[in-house]
Image (spheres, rainbow, N blue to C red):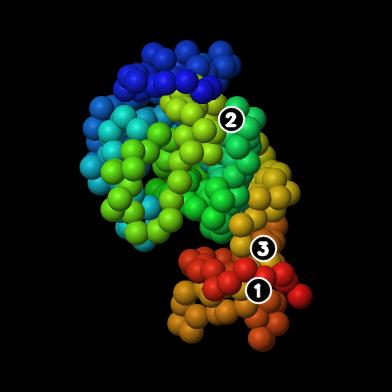
Amino acid sequence: MQGMDNNLLCADRVIKALPTAVREVLQVAVYDTVGSTNDVLREKKGQAALHGTVVIANQQTEGRGRRGRRWCSPAGANLYCSMGWHFNVSLEMLTGLSLAVGAMVAEQIKTHLGVDLQLKWPNDLYYKEQKLGGILVEVLGDEAGGRSVVIGLGLNVNMPEEAGASIERPWTDLKSAVGAEVDRHALAGAVVAGVADGLAQFAESGFAHWHAAWCRRDYLSGRSIVIDGTPPIAGIACGVNGCGALLVESEAGQVAIAGGEASVLEIGAAS
């Protein structure tokens, strides 16, 4: 999967990189420039139009992460991708979906590039203490027979230094991890196929199937952290439970945090 990738992503080459069985169940579209790939999918109405639809962009002008933060999205450098999926399950069964997708993506990158990423609760991908990617899952609301979701993924692949100068937090890309330019068509095919297969599995068993794979890559485990909130909760991160909630050993005992953002205070072993 290594080698110079001088061309913009195109749908034909991404589809060619997919296994035949996956090609038959997905509809892949590649755009030169969009506001955000998640927004393109959100405009589709009804589960039939959304399910299995994949939107990839060469550039985003309004890419965003959690809480509306801007996601740096220069042209022709990284992977900006969203996938629509319909689940015939209750809202509670979707708990842990963003964590599961993180594990799916990390497994594909390990298999195809030999790079072992870490996962930072609830939806970030890290490599050597630097952020490499993020996941944004949006549930579109209740529907007869289940719920449709839009799953957005941003991966720093061949990020130019000048493009990343505006990023406030430490970051890295797959090119730095691999030591060479990464073929984005092959990467897109591998990641899209892995997530599609993983979502079918998630529909059957939820986060439980991905729990062990996620815990092997737990970036926060054993670290002193604080979870934002009113009041904030400080303690030692102790992994996640079977529903994807973060376990924190605090002064009041162990608590399970279902949502929020964790900041690392220092590295240390959990007691």
Contact (Cβ within 8 Å) of mark 1 with mark 3: no
Q: CA distance from mark 3 to mark 2?
A: 25 Å
* Whole-percent x, y for residue 39 in the image: 30, 42
- Foreground residue among 139 and 241: 241
Q: CA distance from mark 2 to mark 1?
A: 32 Å
* Whole-percent x, y for residue 25 in the image: 51, 21
Residue at x 24%, y 32% (from the top left corner): 33
Q: How many other residues sit within 10 Å of disc 2, few (<14), some (14-19) or many (≥20)?
A: some
Contact (Cβ within 8 Å) of mark 2 with mark 1: no
| Residue at which label 3 appears | 221
Q: Nearer the viewer, mark 3 or mark 2?
A: 2
Residue at x 61%, y 73% (from the top left corner): 224
Q: Nearer the viewer, mark 2 or mark 1?
A: 2
* Whole-percent x, y for residue 250 in the image: 65, 81
Is residue 108 visible from the viewing direction of this image?
no
Is residue 122 visible from the viewing direction of this image?
yes
Q: What amino acid is at disc 1? A: Ile
Closer to the chain start, of discs 2 and 1, is 2
Q: What amino acid is at disc 2? A: Leu
Residue at x 47%, y 51% (from the top left corner): 131
Q: Secondary structure at mark 3?
A: loop
* Whole-percent x, y for residue 1 in the image: 53, 22
Q: Is residue 104 left or right of residue 52?
A: right
Q: Is residue 223 left or right of residue 10?
A: right
Q: CA distance from mark 1 to mark 3?
A: 8 Å
Q: What amino acid is at disc 3? A: Ser
| Residue at which label 1 appears | 236
Residue at x 30%, y 50% (from the top left corner): 165
| Residue at which label 2 appears | 113
Q: Is residue 73 left or right of residue 26?
A: left
Q: How many other residues sit within 10 Å of disc 3, few (<14), some (14-19) or many (≥20)?
A: many
